[in-house]
Amino acid sequence: MTHHGLFISFEGIDGAGKSTHITALAEAFRAEGRTVTLTREPGGTPLAEKLRTMVLNEAMDPLTESLLIFAARRDHLVTVIAPALLRGDVVLCDRFTDATFAYQGAGRGFDLKVLATLEQWVQSDEGLLGDPSGNAPMKPEVETVIEPHLTLWFDLSPEGAALRLAGARVPDKFESQPVEFFSRVAAGYAARQQGHPERFARIDADQPREAVWQAVRQVFVEKGWLSGVAGA
């Protein structure tokens, strides 16, 4: 069992059910003595939450949207994520940069090269996590870029996600998009997995909730980050 900080992100299209399992995973880590920081994107800080409200509800072009999301992300990294990792916390984040590439990139058709540049600027360590040779989560090809140690991708067909979302609540501007939009987003997630296979763990989300949870837990047991004792 490692006691270094762990940065875990949860990804998937709206309706994939990822949020359901964040609390269960937090409880599993706490049961083994770990301190857990639960957070989300866009959001996670007072400033980032204000930007989240704008992004989810206001009409804007993809570049404006992307800039607001990355501004929120920088504040989130500086204020919450980096300090938590330095304390040795397990950080569980509902969405991170993969969502930007999937939604703004693939879904909205925004330039992936621009997003990659913003990713490097905004997620630059710049001393946030101390010595880059230590336990900081880094991209192998860009030493100073902070990213999750592990990304759980809850993979569900857009049609299945739409059925789950139907009538659940008043949708935001993304949740109200047509199935075709979510097909592009799902393809964007698949592309991110192909580009970062060592970081992604695909979870088949088209299963009963308990089966999905067991698949999630097994990922962490196999990595040695949780014990093999059944629970949660």
Image (spheres, rainbow, N blue to C red):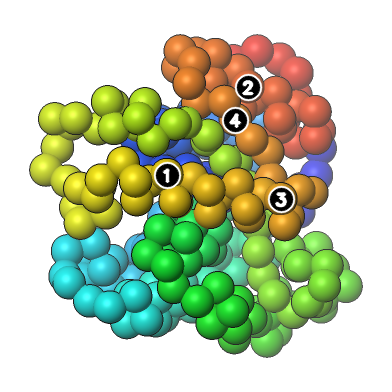
Camera-near label (1 vs 2) is 1
Spatial CA span between label 1 and label 3: 17 Å
> At 72% across and 57% down in the image, what residue appears?
195
Q: Position of residue 207 (x, y in %)?
A: 49, 16
> At 34% across and 46% down in the image, what residue appears?
180
Disc 3 target residue:
194
Disc 2 is placed on an element classified as helix
Spatial CA span between label 3 and label 4: 15 Å
Q: If you read the primary sequence from the N terminus, does the residue marked by circle 3 or circle 4 appear first?
A: 3
Residue 5 vertical position relative to residue 139 in the rendered view, above or below: above
Q: Which mark is residue 203?
A: 4
Q: Amino acid at mark 3?
A: Gln
Camera-near label (3 vs 2) is 3
1 and 2 marks in contact (CB < 8 Å): no
Q: Which mark is residue 183?
A: 1
Q: If you read the primary sequence from the N terminus, does the residue marked by circle 1 or circle 2 appear first?
A: 1
Camera-near label (4 vs 1) is 1
Disc 1 is placed on an element classified as helix
Disc 2 target residue:
215
> At 80% across and 28% down in the image, what residue appears?
222
